[in-house]
Image: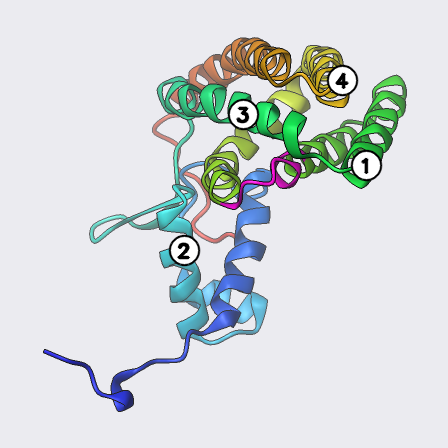
Amino acid sequence: MKRGPSEFVVPKMIGAEVARAFAEHIVYLRWPPGMRLIEEDLCAHFNVSRSPVRDAFQILDGEGLITRAAWRGVRVAPMSVADLDEIYKCRVALEGLVAAEAARNAGEADLALLSTLLTEMDAARADQDVEVFFDRNVAFTRTLHKASGNGTLSRVVSGIEKQALRYRYLAHQNTHEIMDVVCAGDRKVFEAIAARKPELSRRAAVKLIRHAHQVIARVVAEFEEAEQAAAPRSHAASPV
């Protein structure tokens, strides 16, 4: 059956903006895993109607950041070592491919930006400024995605990265080891890309992701144990 022109619905872009705002709260753990997200409270706090909030829920559900169930409502997705392992099995292959493509396609402006971000990461690490370090590290990763010159790859890996971000942030908040691992690993990736060596770049990225995975997994395991010890205490019903 063909759809007529009158059946076309213009996408509500505000839903995507609301989803980005919600995602930030989830990534930075302001809304912890398991927290119930109450539609009415969110509408009042963000001064939006129900429609964009529901659109945002649909987007975040697709990104794996929330869960929706008729008997439990909408909740921030749980965090677990098992989920982390699934995410990083994807990341290790995809980020390796990104690095190899970046070695082939990165422009001088990309390399200059990556170099600047590395310098800022080193400075933040020296100052033990976790927030700035994390921000620059995320920017470094996303610059690599763009520098790959492969739009399809960038979109796919960016989707996986969204699920990885809160795990990465949790590790940054709980151990300075992750900054040491990331600084050393990102620099080796950058040097291989700047030398235009795709296979060396791929190997450096794979090594970095695997090492980071090990560090993050230890932190998440401790987090899981703490969550289980706190059960059956439930998270606050309202996110605002």
Three-letter amino acid code at the position of disc 3: Glu
Mark 3: secondary structure: helix
Q: Residues within 10 Å of mark 3 (few under 14, many from 20)?
A: many
- Residue farthest left in this picture: 1
State if disc 4 and disc 1 touch (CB < 8 Å). Answer: no
Relative image position of residue 209 (x, y in whole percent)? 56, 16
Mark 1 vs mark 2: which is more N-terminal?
2
Q: Residue at x 38, y 41 (%)?
A: 64
Mark 4 vs mark 2: which is more N-terminal?
2
Label 2 belongs to which residue? Answer: 59
Label 1 belongs to which residue? Answer: 108
Relative image position of residue 93 (x, y in whole percent)? 46, 21
Three-letter amino acid code at the position of disc 2: Ile
Real-space Cα separation, disc 1 to disc 3, in angstroms: 20 Å
What type of secondary structure mainly makes up the magenta span? helix
Mark 1: secondary structure: helix
Numbered tag placed on residue 195 in the rendering: 4
Q: Is 135 above or below relative to 126? A: below
Q: Which residues are magenta?
A: 144-151
Quarter the C terminus occupies: bottom right
Numbered tag placed on residue 222 in the rendering: none
